[in-house]
Image (cartoon, grey):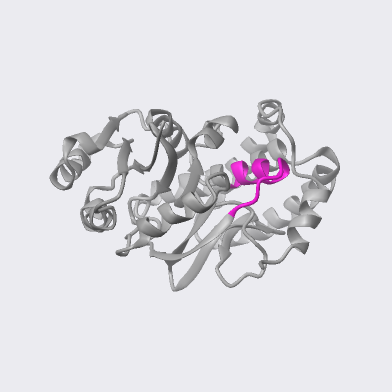
C-alpha cells in the first residue's frame, strides 16, 4: 500500500455542486500523491462527465451504483477500492482552499495512526468533528468547544485505511446521517482519540435534499431511527439504562419541532423503526462499547 492519500467522495444528485468544488480539489492536490474515488449513487446526473473534465483518467476511479445503497455503503465501497495508506472522506459540497491537502498530508506524516477531524464552515458557524449531545445524542461539534472531538465528521475525515477496515467501516444499515457518530463512539470506546486539523473548509451542507420535501421527510425518518440504533449498538447496558429515558424525553421535544416543520409523521415512523430494529443492530457489533467511563473521560478531557 502506497504512502499516499485517496479522497473518497459519495455522490448523489451532485453534478452542479461538484462542478463548483472539484476544481478547488484539483488545485489543492497539485504536486501531491493524492488519488480520487467517487462512489456515485445517482449516476444519471452526469457526475462522471464532471470528474472526467477535471481529472486525468489514471488519477481517479468512478464507481456508479444506480440502486442508491446510501452514504455509508458508498463510503465503504470506495474505501475498499482505495490502495493508499490513508483516506480523506470528503463531501462533494466542500471547497478545498489552496494548501489544505498539503496540511492534511503533513498531519498524516506527523501521526499516521490517529483519525483527523477537519473543520467545516457552514450555515454561519464553524464546526470540527462530532460532539455528544444530551438531547440529540450526537451533533456537529462547534470549533470553539474546549473538548476534543468524539470523532471526525463523515463530511471531512481522515482515517488510516487499515483502521477504517478494522472497525468495519460505517454501519451500512444506517444508510445516512449518524454513521460517522456510530463509528466515533466505537473508536472512542476502543481508546482511539481524534486529532483536530486547523483547517476550515467552506461547506454548503444539505445539497442532496435541498428543495425536495420527500427527501426531507426521509432525512427526518433516518435521523430519528438512527439515533436509537447508534445508542443500541454502541452503548454499554448501564449507560443504555440511563440513556433510553433521556432519549425518550428528547424525542418528545424533537417531535414538537418536527411537527412545526411538517415532518412529524416520518419522524414518528423513524422512532418506531428504531425501537424495533435496536436489538438486531446491537447484535451486529461485538467490539467494545461506550460506557460511563468513556463518557466521563470524554467530558473531562480538554484540548491542550
Out of 91 and 87, give the one closest to the viewer: 87
| Residue 235 seen from this side | yes
Q: Residue 26: percent from the left, percent from the top?
A: 24, 53
Q: Residue at x 33, y 63 (%)?
A: 99
167 on left or right of 231: left
Q: Does the image show residue 170?
A: no
Position in image of residue 105 (x %, y %): 41, 52
In the image shown, does 16 or 196 lie closer to the viewer?
196
| Left or right side of 304 for 208 | left
> In percent of the image, x 58 and y 72: which residue is there?
144
Magenta span: chief secondary structure: helix
Q: Is residue 152 magenta?
A: no
- Residue at horizontal 68 percent and vertical 59 percent from the top: 133
Residue range in magenta is 181-194
Residue 178 position (above or below residue 207):
above
Q: Is residue 151 above or below residue 57?
A: below
Amino acid at each position: 500500500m502506497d504512502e499516499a492519500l485517496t479522497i473518497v467522495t459519495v455522490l448523489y444528485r451532485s453534478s452542479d455542486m461538484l462542478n463548483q468544488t472539484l476544481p478547488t480539489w484539483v488545485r489543492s492536490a497539485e504536486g501531491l500523491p493524492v488519488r480520487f474515488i467517487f462512489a456515485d449513487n445517482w449516476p444519471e446526473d452526469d457526475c462522471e462527465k464532471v470528474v472526467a473534465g477535471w481529472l486525468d483518467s489514471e488519477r481517479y476511479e468512478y464507481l456508479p451504483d444506480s440502486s442508491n445503497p446510501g452514504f455509508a455503503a458508498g463510503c465503504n465501497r470506495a474505501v475498499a477500492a482505495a490502495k493508499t495508506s490513508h483516506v480523506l472522506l470528503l463531501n462533494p459540497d466542500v471547497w478545498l482552499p489552496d494548501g489544505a491537502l498539503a496540511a492534511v498530508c503533513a498531519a498524516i506524516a506527523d501521526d499516521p495512526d490517529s483519525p483527523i477531524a477537519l473543520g467545516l464552515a457552514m450555515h454561519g458557524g464553524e464546526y470540527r468533528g462530532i460532539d455528544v449531545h444530551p438531547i440529540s445524542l450526537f451533533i456537529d461539534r462547534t470549533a470553539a468547544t474546549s473538548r476534543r472531538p468524539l470523532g471526525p465528521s463523515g463530511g471531512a475525515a481522515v482515517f488510516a485505511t487499515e483502521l477504517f477496515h478494522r472497525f468495519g467501516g460505517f454501519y451500512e444499515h444506517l444508510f445516512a446521517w449518524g454513521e460517522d457518530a456510530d463509528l466515533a463512539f466505537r473508536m472512542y470506546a476502543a481508546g482511539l482519540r481524534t486529532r483536530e486539523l486547523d483547517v476550515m473548509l467552506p461547506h454548503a451542507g444539505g445539497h442532496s435534499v435541498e428543495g425536495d420535501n420527500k427527501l426531507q421527510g426521509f432525512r427526518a425518518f433516518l435521523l430519528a431511527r438512527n439515533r436509537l440504533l447508534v445508542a443500541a449498538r454502541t452503548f454499554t447496558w448501564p449507560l443504555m439504562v440511563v440513556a433510553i429515558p433521556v432519549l425518550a424525553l428528547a424525542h418528545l421535544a424533537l417531535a414538537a419541532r418536527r411537527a412545526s416543520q411538517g415532518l412529524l409523521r416520518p419522524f414518528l415512523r423513524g422512532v418506531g423503526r428504531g425501537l424495533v430494529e435496536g436489538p438486531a443492530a446491537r447484535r451486529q457489533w461485538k467490539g467494545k462499547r461506550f460506557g460511563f467511563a468513556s463518557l466521563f473521560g470524554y467530558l473531562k478531557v480538554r484540548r491542550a
